[in-house]
Image (spheres, rainbow, N blue to C red):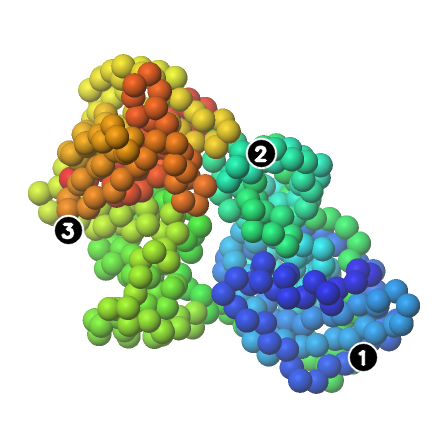
Amino acid sequence: MKKIIPFLLTTAVTILSATVISFAASSYHVDKSQLQNFAGKTAVATADVTLGSAYFLTSSDGSTYTDTLKPMTTDYTIKKGNILVILESADANTYRVTIPAMGDAELISGFLDKKYVSSDKTLISNANQCIFTNVIGTSYLTGAKKTISGRSTIYSRENGKFLIGLPGGDERFWINAGDASFNFDGTRTDVSYTAYKSIMGGDSKPTPPPSSNNYILPNSNSKYLTEADIQGLSGDQLRLARNEIYARHGRIFDTQDLITYFNSQAWYHGTIQPANFNENVLNQYEKANIALIQKVEAAKSGNTGLSKVELKVTMNKLQYTVNGTPMMFDVAPYLDTKANRSMIPMRFIAEAFGATVTWDDTTKTQTIQLNGKTFKLTQNVALPDGMGTPVLVKDRFFVPLRYVSQELGASVDWDDATQTNTIIYYK
């Protein structure tokens, strides 16, 4: 078994993010005879679901035998797309699973209804976590390359690459998707089910409670949504989904129907008054998705003052289209392979949306104004969150497409096969 105690704090932060792990005051000694080796099989969660009767099993330090089982006293929520390792079938309807930590240690085990667990290889290949061994990673901050190994959450998927992290550090790296593995198969040592029932007092098998994390858009904080993802929602559902993004960050609401709705959600903990809420806590996905939902909300409400602008921009091609009409760049857009970002001439795109663009040659800064919002981009100054760096190419100011679209309130969809970005904006 692996030595686990030294890794408890860092591992808990990695896999639970906003949840504080709490264990029962009592703990139970596990004799060697009560342990069993399981042929762990990789699977994936098919919904947000609470792990039933979750427990933590410490391991031997290699000299003094100190195995201890500690029940958790707080809910442990598994997110849709998270990797699981199946230990065994507890009965016809229930698996006992363990959660592979994105570090060096196994941390949590428990029980799940089989309907929330899948071994389908296609679903597994789209999981939120992966393994990589001796692969070349490119730092999203510096562009430096290094050979890396480990397990990680997949923070972003773009252009055939995964953005991953390393245990114990904050730095992120791009790796080729083909270099990642989703195979977490392997022997897992855990307490036997018979011993578990004996230790926990009684023969009744714990059953998993139903999920209480009923998000309308579970991935709105971790991926760029498209119109197709939300077109099926009603106007009321879109309003809730938009405010759900703020609610994840603890925003309190001042409209009674929103107060009633979010107070009924077990995951919601309102702590920040509206006047004190800072939108800087939102990540790049959340900002873009709020803008997208607002546009679709407005369109569904029959607001005829909105018009749709759709641009199609293909890498290394001078021709692009605006609402189907062919237009021409004088310098072609390109893919920055170092930062893994689509780079476009800023002025062409911004003006298609109706923005005003000015250039300050002294400071090498471009200022964009649209609908009362102003933001500035400076040549060779890196953007936040590893979003790329504006550069000058043949006297044209090139910027990372996704960052600019996010700031302007547009949505972006990437077609890897044709190397084409589709940008949609409502004005």
- From what the image shows, is residue 240 above or below residue 201? above
Does residue 29 show up? yes
In the displayed structure image, the side of residue 417 where residue 275 appears, left or right: left
Of pointers 3 and 1, the one earlier in the residue sequence: 1
> Residue 105: x percent and y percent?
72, 59
Q: Are marks 1 and 2 in contact (CB under 8 Å)?
A: no
Residue hosting label 3: 301
Q: Are marks 3 and 1 in contact (CB under 8 Å)?
A: no
In the displayed structure image, the side of residue 413 where residue 72 appears, left or right: right
Residue hosting label 1: 29
Quadrant in the picture for residue 365: top left
Residue hosting label 2: 144
Indicate which disc residue 286 carries. none
The mark closer to the camera, 1 or 2, is 2
Residue shown at the point (11%, 47%) measured from the top left: 303
> Could you tell me which quadrant the C terminus lies in?
top left
Give the CA distance from mark 2 to mark 3: 48 Å
Residue shown at the point (39%, 70%) measured from the top left: 268
Q: Amino acid at mark 2?
A: Ala
Give the CA distance from mark 3 to mark 1: 61 Å
